[in-house]
Image: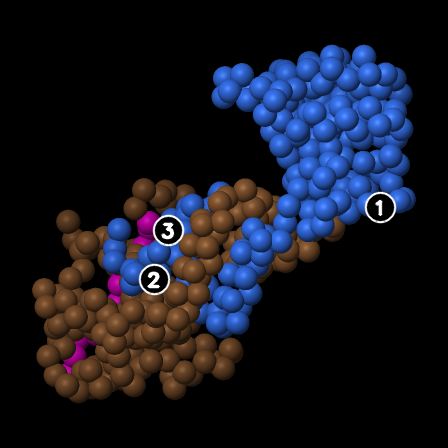
Chain colours: A blue, B brown
Amino acid sequence: MPDFAEPLARLINEFKRLPGIGQKSAQRIAFHVLRAGREDAEHLARAILDVKDKLGLCAVCNNISDSEICQFCRDPNRDSRVVCVVEEPHNIIGIETTREFNGRYHVLHGALSPLRGIGPESLKIKGLVERIGQGGIEEEIVATNPTVEGEATAVYLARLLKPLGVKVSRIAMGIPVGSDLEFADEVTISKAMEGRREM
Amino acid sequence: MPDFAEPLARLINEFKRLPGIGQKSAQRIAFHVLRAGREDAEHLARAILDVKDKLGLCAVCNNISDSEICQFCRDPNRDSRVVCVVEEPHNIIGIETTREFNGRYHVLHGALSPLRGIGPESLKIKGLVERIGQGGIEEEIVATNPTVEGEATAVYLARLLKPLGVKVSRIAMGIPVGSDLEFADEVTISKAMEGRREM
């Protein structure tokens, strides 16, 4: 590594620690910050600290929120009878961009993974059971990832929640829209066949 | 755009303004910062402000430096007779990683571009002429980019500096090592032919 001036080397190292940013990107971004005005740098630094200081978890669904109850749990126009269960807060964004879902959410903050020592007690499952106990929920849509961990979590939740009298459904797995069968792996194709719908 | 909590939306927007970072990367990085400890976030924020507060330009070569004279101009082991002229400070890094060059540098902070209103007076050329006037420099290696602007700058510098009694050379243009002739454009191939060397 060639010698950068110390503050620059430190900034490059800090950027490199962020996901998806390697040495070259970190250098490019650091030089960008260096060229930008001090005010722009301040805004960026301030924004970084503010997410740590001003955000917490929603008391109802565990989504990230700047108030005690998040915007989705607060919104009276959303359907309280349907709750979509996701692994991480950012999964909500993906679902919201579709504009197809108008129910509530519940964030588990992870998925079951015995290998990594993540059992049901490590996830925000207790709150979900309590929400169902309070009544009014008719369906839980389990939108955990289609991975081994996500599937295991879905199966666990189905066994746990069905006896409480709610319908538990799972999002469909299949070929992504706009993709080609040629590029899909056999498990995905088999899931797509299994989940076929009459036209 | 779905609703993020305000501090999170602001951080995502700040990251999106950085080069090479789009919406998805910005979200990923912002969620990473959110999950990281407060201390890590502080280090990042501090590093951003420090590059603005603690760095300036070297009084000799205009490289970015945390002292009045940069490490390359200070180093007594470097050869003062050869000066490599580059467009931007980060170009120095590329050259330093080769470990082939042991001379000094001069940073122009741009390249001539009449279309964008960048003339010789916008570049750090005056200081270069002064350095040559002080004596001791025998060769200027012009390592501006092989673009229209970089070439124009190189031609301009050659005309300006040769009468001062220094040798002015230009880095070689040709096929990148490890690449294939098939993928090279005709201008690059023609430059490679032109710059051929006897074996």
Q: Which residue is mark 3?
A: A13
Label 3, secondary structure: give it: helix
The mark nearer the N terminus, 2 or 1, is 2
Q: Which residue is mark 1?
A: A75
Q: Residue at x 84, y 46 (%)?
A: A75
Within-10-Å neighbours for mark 1: few <14, some 14–19, many 20+: few
Q: Residue at x 72, y 39 (%)?
A: A59
Are discs 2 and 1 less than 8 Å apart at CB? Answer: no
- The disc placed on residue A41 is none
Q: Using the numbered discs, state the Cα–Cα distance from disc 1 to disc 3 in whole angstroms.
A: 41 Å
Q: Residue A135 appears at what percent x and percent y?
A: 87, 26
Q: Amino acid at mark 2?
A: Pro
Highlighted magenta segment, given as a residue range:
B165-176
Q: Residue at x 33, y 49 (%)?
A: B176
Q: Residue A49 appears at what percent x and percent y?
A: 54, 56
- The rendered magenta stretch, by its main secondary structure, is classed as loop
Q: Amino acid at mark 3?
A: Asn
Within-10-Å neighbours for mark 2: few <14, some 14–19, many 20+: many
Q: Using the numbered discs, state the Cα–Cα distance from disc 2 to disc 1 in whole angstroms.
A: 45 Å
Marked residue chain, label 1: A
Marked residue chain, label 3: A
Q: Residue at x 39, y 71 (%)?
A: B53
Q: Amino acid at mark 1?
A: Asp
Within-10-Å neighbours for mark 3: few <14, some 14–19, many 20+: some
Answer with the quarter of the image where residue A11 lies: bottom left
From the viewer's perspective, is residue B104 above or below residue B160?
Answer: above
Label 2, secondary structure: give it: helix
Q: Which residue is mark 2?
A: A7
Q: Does residue B126 appear in this view?
A: yes
